[in-house]
Image (spheres, rainbow, N blue to C red):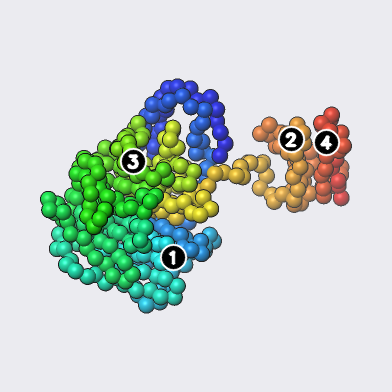
Amino acid sequence: MRVVRGIAVGLLALVLAGGADGVRLAVSQERTTAALPLSDWQFRAWRIAAGGAHPLAQLPDDTLVIGTETGVARFDGHRMSMLPLPTATIPAPVKLLFVDAAGTLHIVCVDSSHLCVAAADAWVCTTTGNVPAGDGDSAFEPTSICEDRDGIVWIGHRNGLVSRTSGRTSTWLETAGAETSAADAAVQVATDASGRVWMARKGRLAVWDAGRWDSRHVLPDGPFTLAAANDGGLWLRAGGDGQVSHFSEGDGLRRAIGTDVPSIRVMHEDATGRLWMATWRLGLVVWDGKRLATAPTNAPSIYSVLSDREGVLWVGTPAGLERGAPRIVRRIEMATSKPLRSIRTTAAGDMWFITLDGELGCRRRETTTFPSRRDEWKHGAVTAISTTAEERSGSARRLAAWCG
């Protein structure tokens, strides 16, 4: 990523597109020598007709899988197709996707049904023990998923409860004495770098320890978003104002970003330490530890965000799938729509080119001219161009054009 130097102390104002009236984020900046030029990023979109792309996951063979309203699609970088399920069907829209350490794909639907796909097999997880009473159709809607160090998959639900899946069986955890299952107590779960499971629920942040939830910090009322941090701690968005904080057992809960980021759906820290925040009306927001910015995605509402093993960023939106990466090739607008046969640049920065039909052109300081279109041009079609020895040494500006 290109580094921009000399950022002054002051106020950084970013207008975030996506809301009906727009939302302005103002970030008080400390002195820094690094900026986050997300204009140097480019995003390419693929449309998905069936309700867009909700959750995303990457299979062991690097194939991307995408949850939709009607099933799971797979994307190999070029083509989109539906994922075949040998022995099971998907009964409801897909809410969560997760690939565990063994390579099993977990598909969790909005009605909390849990399907698993491994190699050539697929199955529906069965529930054991007491099933809590639901309060409405969306009571058991899943909110988050993670895997602990023992290979057990944990799922947080909207009604404030947590289920655990080991093998082909899921078990509901009982609530603590003072807690009840309620729609306003939706729970988020995440695993830290050591493999411990954390829960953010109305009123507290707790870790699973010795068969029970051990409270570690008092939280305001929800909603919450919880995600693992690379340093072993946790990222937490707590409360309705969109305050983003970082939690570690040594420092406790500390505000990480000086400006609230409302409407966060998902947070994800990539391998480089950037914290990406998928929001439902502010687009894709990113924090690099010093600056807050928005990514130039095509959609203003973001369902999910994932960085793959190659460091490429994938984003799920209501319209479909987007891929983001630092811009490597910069588009140069040319004053011709003809295909180009050859391009050569000079030491002075001039760009000479030949079109497929033999026209000779030169782009100099944003202006393109065509010597072969002049009345005095008597050489016919141009087949090749090269710089002379004087030009290569930088002592002159000469170019040899070979004409047919």
The residue lying toward the viewer, choosing from 379 and 303, is: 303
Which residue is tagged 3?
248
The residue positioned farthest toward the bottom in the image shown? 87
What is the crowding at mark 3: few (fewer than 14 residues within 10 Å), some, or many (at least 20)?
some
The residue positioned farthest toward the front in the image shown? 210
Identity, as a three-letter code, of the amino acid under mark 1: Gly
Give the spatial CA distance, label 1 vs label 2.
Answer: 52 Å
Numbered label attached to residue 103: 1
Regarding mark 2 in the picture, which secondary structure is present there? loop
Label 3 with label 2: CB-CB less than 8 Å: no
Which residue is tagged 2?
350
Q: Is residue 311 above or below residue 373?
A: below
Mark 4 or mark 3: which comes first in sequence? Answer: 3
Residue 12, horizontal then vertical, whole percent: 42, 27
Give the spatial CA distance, label 4 vs label 2.
Answer: 13 Å
Mark 1 or mark 2: which comes first in sequence? Answer: 1
Nearest to the eye among marks 4 and 2: give it: 4
Res 236 seen here? yes
What is the crowding at mark 4: few (fewer than 14 residues within 10 Å), some, or many (at least 20)?
some
Give the spatial CA distance, label 4 vs label 1.
Answer: 55 Å
Give the spatial CA distance, label 4 vs label 3.
Answer: 58 Å
Which residue is tagged 4?
392
Nearest to the eye among marks 4 and 1: give it: 1
Q: Residue at x 43, y 25 (%)?
A: 30
Residue 170, horizontal then vertical, whole percent: 27, 67
Residue 144, horizontal then vertical, whole percent: 31, 55
Q: Quadrant of residue 217?
A: top left
